[in-house]
Image (spheres, rainbow, N blue to C red):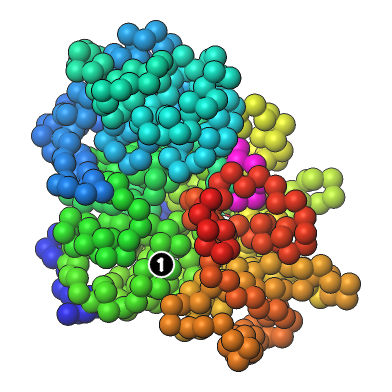
Amino acid sequence: MHFATTTKDEHAATVTPNLTNYAETYRDFDWQDASSCIDGLPGSAINITYEAVDRHLQHGYGDKTAIRWLPKSGAPQTLSYAKLAEQTSRFASVLQMLGIRKGDRIFGLAGRTPGLYVALLGSLKYGAVFSPLFSAFGPEPIRSRMSIGDARLLVTTERLYRKKVMPWRDQMPGLQHVLLIDTSDNLPEGCHDLDRLLASADPTFPVEATDPEDMALLHFTSGTTGTPKGAVHAHQAVIYHILSGRYALDLHRDDIYWCTADPGWVTGTSYGVIAPLCHGLTMVIDEAEFDATRWYEILQNEQVSVWYTAPTAIRMLMKAGDDLPAQYNLPHLRFIASVGEPLNPEAILWSERVLGLPFHDNWWQTETGGIMLANFAAAPIKPGAMGQPLPGIEAAIVHRDRDGQIHFSDTPDDVGELALKCGWPSMFRAYLNAEERYHSCFQDGWYLSGDLAYRDSEGYFWFVGRADDVIKSAGHLVGPFEVESVLIEHPAVAEAAVIGIPDKVVGEQVKAYVALKGDYKPSEILRKELIGHARKHLGASISPKEIEFRDNLPKTRSGKIMRRLLKARELGQPVGDISTLESDEDGARK
Ligand code: ATP
Ligand code: MG
């Protein structure tokens, strides 16, 4: 049976989207009213963990499953909201016992195991700051981020500790404690066994009454365009996590939700921990890495109803072919969304055909802390567009003049920088130790995103490219995304990355790097065919003059194509910070 013919189950069929009238909700939105989505704590205090976990016990949902954890192998484990409240209280009391102070920085370096989630939520419950690190980082990116963040305590596993932290630990005297999630008979020197500490800790530790502006999370950006920045987020961000989860991901309490992002990236925290738990639903956490068969099995067997993933993963599913999904039945799946990179229209057409549902693209950044633009459940999707601003968010296209002043563009389809009016709760409060850089992102009360986009006459925003990635060729502004999307429409192409190469005559020439689907081999004929295909759809002026075949494209560990690396290598320039590079062009793992 094919998905397109699968009938949706009762829940999926009867759920009314949270946002049914976008125009009206947007017009009438009021932050004062919206803030009532949280319960809050006495004295106007707000604590993320209280909203995500403990308050559900007050409302009678303690027994409900909060987390369905799927280990790499073995049987799934479940954690109820009551158990999560207890475990996070134990963790908070361990922090107290170790002399950790409010505001101290706790780092997490572990795979997607329950211990990591307990550490994250327990740290916030205590009033400490949590900074999740992606566990596949090497020793240096870990050391440098922990040094920028002034780490006081690290939660990790014995294997990761021995391999990635022990070599430099004595250079970081501020790192007072290391807690190991996995128990071992052979505890390395200077480490605690977290399970043992938790077992004897107070399970009733009360939630700290943190101020809404208290620092809660420190998130490092993906490093796609340069050295990663440490973005600071406050406890009141939770208001926006709830609202955006409601509007952009259409979360309902009865949902089974799966966010495939790792908490080492902001998506895996804002929408892989906080927003879903705040909505009181059941979320699936998969410990394993991407595997097409496993993913379809999870969607089917866990009866996932809302799924939030990323373009790279979607393209990998597409590459795995249509026969595989045809073996599964997904009547529960109701809403699917994507973030992190431009979502090629081809991917939406594919999911409609193969999964029976269109992917809803949305846009945001580590800095924004939450989804800013989205294709909504009840509004028409425009394939290729990032969507419309969420209620409460004002977005605009601006131009900067020579003096750095911004000018607003009212002309539909005019390409400029995407800007957001300051004031939403999950906005970053600082780049840690980089004040000047932080201030340079703002102008006249607007946050300048560094992404180029345009707004069409119906108010949808379309991604053109990173300001740094846009190509200027013979007087045309070429957005890499537009060219890549056309290339990917060709049946042979799995992935494409487009850059500009300096050219004396036209300024920059468009060059494309292409990874082919399994059944296709690079050849001169195919190269010509692809150039012809691009010309037909894009016209001669912006289609690539050169196409190079690669087995793989260089990506960040969060799955973003690193165009700057392709360009630096092409031009023989220094490659810059590649601490977040996942795999090289030849497919070799770092
Ligand atoms: P760095 O800032 O370190 O260079 P980064 O910008 O990739 O890394 P993130 O904050 O993880 O770090 O990613 C945000 C960026 O991802 C956005 O500015 C945008 O360029 C891109 N992005 C996210 N979602 C989308 C989307 N739906 N369409 C197009 N681009 C997107
Ligand atoms: Mg960025």
Q: Is residue 228 magenta?
A: yes
**Residue 334, placed above or below residue 492:** above
**Residue sticking out furthest to the right:** 504
Q: Is residue 324 left or right of residue 142?
A: left
Q: Is residue 171 left or right of residue 72?
A: right
Comparing 511 with 8, the one in front is: 511
The reply to whether residue 38 is visible in this rendering is: no
Q: Quadrant of residue 155?
A: top left
What is the chief secondary structure element of the magenta stretch?
A: loop
Quadrant of the image for the N terminus? bottom left
Residue 492 pos. (x, y %)? 49, 82
**Residue 204, placed above or below residue 233:** above
Q: Quadrant of residue 21?
A: bottom left
Q: Quadrant of residue 190?
A: top left
Residue, disc 1: 316
Q: Is residue 120 magenta?
A: no
Magenta residues span 224-233
Residue, x 37% and y 76% (percent of image)? 350
Q: Amino acid at mark 1?
A: Met
Pointer 1 local density, CA inside 10 Å: few below 14, some 14–19, many at least 20 = some
Residue 477 pos. (x, y %)? 73, 69
Residue, x 31% and y 78% (percent of image)? 322
Comparing 351 with 399, the one in front is: 351
Tag 1, which secondary structure? helix
The reply to whether residue 548 is visible in this rendering is: yes
**Residue sticking out furthest to the front:** 186
Residue, x 63% and y 88% (percent of image)? 524
Q: Is residue 183 left or right of residue 523?
A: left
Residue, x 48% and y 26% (percent of image)? 166
Residue 69 pos. (x, y %)? 22, 44
